[in-house]
Image: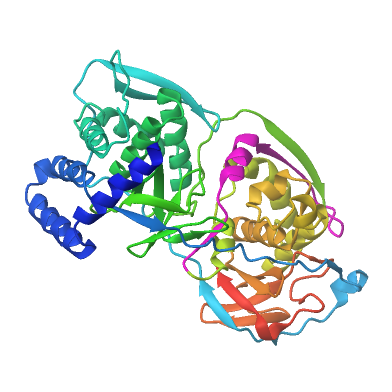
Amino acid sequence: MKKILFLILFAIIEFQVWGQNNFQKEFDDFFKEASNEFDSFRDQINKQYADFLLTNWKEFTAMAPIEKPEQKPLPPVRYENNLEIKDKDIKPVPIHFDKVIQAPAPKPQPKPVEPIKKSKETTLENINFSCFGMNLTVRVPQSRRKFKLESLNLGDLSRGWKKLSSHSYDSMISDCLEIRTQKKLCDWAYLQLLKSFVNSYLGNSDSATFMIAYIFSQSGYKMRLGLDGDRLFFLYGTDCIVYNRPFFKINGSNYYVFDSDENKLFIADIPYPEEEGLSLKIEQEQMFGDAGHKKRNFKSERYSVTSECDINEEQIRFFDTYPSGQIGDDFMTRWAIYANTPLSESAKNILYPSLIKKIDGKTEIEGADILLDFVQTSFEYEYDDKVWGGDRVFFAEETLYYPYCDCEDRSILYSHLVRDLLGLDVALIYYPNHLATAVKFSNGPEGDYIQLEEGDFTICDPTFIGAPVGNTMTGMDNSSVNIIVL
């Protein structure tokens, strides 16, 4: 009965609501007018936003999930002539390719429409909580009664927004943004931070969902509020595609329901000025806490390189939460996200010294060959569907942590080693159901290579076991090769 009354209410609201074009024009006109009064810009925006919550709701049906591109990895191939490698005469041979994709360029994280100063209130309460091993504190107004939505009535939602934007909670937003900066959190980690903080403060409730949405919008991100019967939902906007999740297409952006797969909602389609979408990229090492490590030892076959690694398990816990997806319309960008996520300094400090010692004094090609053999022979190959029940791409840290990996994981790790230790550019090479790498050497190509505007990139395949640089793995079809330059 409650849900029926709720739907009747929305039917009435739908009758009264502005057309989307009229609403957008009214909001844009207000935005221009408020911009002329910078000192009170955010105040005016939030007041108008709260007023819009009374009326501008519309029923949306989600788009069907975009399925993760399923790969059927080819088994590793062992190079048969590995005893004659040093005597092998490798001649440069250009290979054909289908298309080239550039890795998306870095860009700054979203920011508030104007700087948010810490609240002048002196009666603030510390909320202590933990997120990925980080022990953190965020300040909220001290009150006998915590923030709470009285109901999901539109009037109460509007009053709730006005209460949060009354400046009493500015220190809360400022503290969250300061943590994002100090801990170098990516957008997804920031969203997880807000969830940990607000749930510690308010528990898992509609009020908590509302507060997460509020902080997220004030931080500069695209978000929408959604209602279904007697539940409130928060949707984050992104220009990326998150695989296997239904999404709502609103004003050209994809909106995903956080921690839910709802496919029909009444959504307050209210654009916040200068809002930007959540990015799936991780541009810098994040400073998570240290709550346990896992050690592994490695040894390569041909060059007998021995090394070890010590992985912070909080990094692994974070990667477990990370949504698999792509940037824009090309699925190859998914691998760029993983390959351009930096390896942690703590992992490098233990893994790299023995590798650096082994390649010291060697030519670029010799160094690349030593590193290639290390990745080819120090890690055990296994299919994702056998280990994980389906395709799963690893960040480099995960390849060093888990006992098994496949071709894409090896290629991502190798791309890190070559860029970090040799300072050379790398491209990822995608054949149907197989991923390899190619390296741009200073003195030109060596063996099979791909000619790009950026220069010549020599094939280096971490899954062609025992093969030196310049060898395409047996059975690969060069006519359908796609390339992404990292």
Rendered location of residue 79, percent (x, y): 87, 71
Residue 64 seen in render: yes
Residue, x 55% and y 53% (percent of image)? 341
294 left or right of 466 in image = left
Q: Quadrant of residue 148?
A: top left
Rendered location of residue 60, percent (x, y): 38, 57
245 left or right of 234 in image = right
Residue 232 seen in render: no
Rendered location of residue 343, percent (x, y): 59, 48
Residue, x 42% and y 35% (percent of image)? 194
7 left or right of 371 in image = left
Query: In front: 240, or 161?
Result: 161
Rendered location of residue 159, percent (x, y): 21, 33
* Magenta-drawn segment: 300-328
Residue 303 lies in the magenta stretch: yes
Image position of 199 with respect to 328: above or below: above
Image position of 103 with respect to 135: above or below: below
The image quadrant where one finds the C terminus is bottom right
Residue, x 61% and y 77% (percent of image)? 482
Query: In front: 67, or 415?
Result: 67
The image quadrant where one finds the N terminus is top left
